[in-house]
Image (cartoon, rainbow, N blue to C red):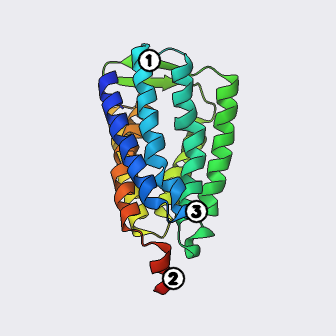
Amino acid sequence: MCWSATADLIAGAGIAAVGLASVTLAVRRPRDLPLAALPLLLGSHQIIEAAVWHHDGGTGPATVAWAVIALPLLALWAPAAVLCAAPRTARRRLLVPLAAGVATATALTYALATRTVTAEIRGHTVGYSLGLPHTELIVAGYLLATIGSLLLSGDRGLILLGVLVAIGAAVSAALWRQEYISTWCASAAVCSLVVLFWVRGRRPPDAATRS
C-alpha cells in the first residue's frame, strides 16, 4: 500500500472483511472459492506490510512474508483460481497463463530461497528489492499469469477486474517506478470489491442447472 502503516492496517482489515464476505457467498459454488478468497489473501498481505512499515523495512520475517505472497504465491494463485471459476469454454486457453504462473512462481521461489529480499521506506511508499535476473521476462510472465488469466477468463466480471488491475498496474508503474510492486499490489487489493460483486452476481448451482 502507500502512505503509512496505519493506512495499510486499516485497508488490510477492510479488504480482509470483503474477503470473508466473498467466501461466505461462494460456499455454494466450490469452484469459485479460490477466487472468492483472493481478497482475504490480499487483505492479509496489506496487514503484513503494516508490520514492514513498523520495522522500518529491512530484511526481517515481515518483509519475507510480504514477498512470498506478492511474488510466487499470487503468480500461481491467480491463474489457478480463474481456471477453477471460468466457463468450460475458456478453460483450455487458460492453461497458457497457468503455465506462465507455474514457471514464474518457480523462478521467484528459487530467487527468494537464494537471495535476500529487502524493503526500504521511501517517503510514503515501500520499495522492495530482490535483485532478480531476467527481470523483464519474469515481469512478463507474472502479468500474463495474473492479469492475462482474468482477461482470458470468458467471464464479463472477471474481464472487468482484469482491465481495472491492468490500469492500476500501469498507473503504479508511471507514478512510482521504484515502488511499483508495492503500489501495484495495493491497486489489486482495492479491486477486491469487484470480486465481491462478482461473487454476489453468480447464480447458485441449482439455478444454473435449471437454466
- Label 2 is placed on what type of residue? Thr
Categorize mark 2 by other alpha carbons within 10 Å: few (<14), some (14-19), many (20+). Answer: few
Judged by depth in the image, the label closer to the viewer, 1 or 2, is 2
Judged by depth in the image, the label closer to the viewer, 1 or 3, is 3
- Label 3 is placed on what type of residue? Cys
Dividing the image into 4 quarters, which one contains the C terminus? Answer: bottom left
Q: Residue at x 57, y 48 (%)?
A: 77
Residue 163: percent from the left, percent from the top?
Answer: 38, 57
Q: Is disc 2 placed on a helix, strand or loop?
A: helix
3D distance between C-alphas at marks 1 and 2: 52 Å
- Which residue has dot 1 on it? 120
- Label 1 is placed on what type of residue? Glu
Q: Residue at x 49, y 60 (%)?
A: 27
Sequence-wise, which precedes: disc 1 or disc 3?
3
Residues tagged 1 and 2 counted as in contact (Cβ below 8 A): no
- Figure quadrant of residue 204: bottom left
Q: Is residue 107 above or below residue 98?
A: above
Q: Is residue 96 above or below residue 11?
A: below
Please state which of residues 186 and 136 is positioned toward the viewer in this rendering: 186
Sequence-wise, which precedes: disc 1 or disc 2?
1
- Which residue has dot 3 on it? 84
3D distance between C-alphas at marks 1 and 3: 36 Å
Q: Residue at x 34, y 44 (%)?
A: 190
Q: Is disc 3 placed on a helix, strand or loop?
A: helix
Residue 110: percent from the left, percent from the top?
Answer: 70, 32
Residue 33 visible = yes
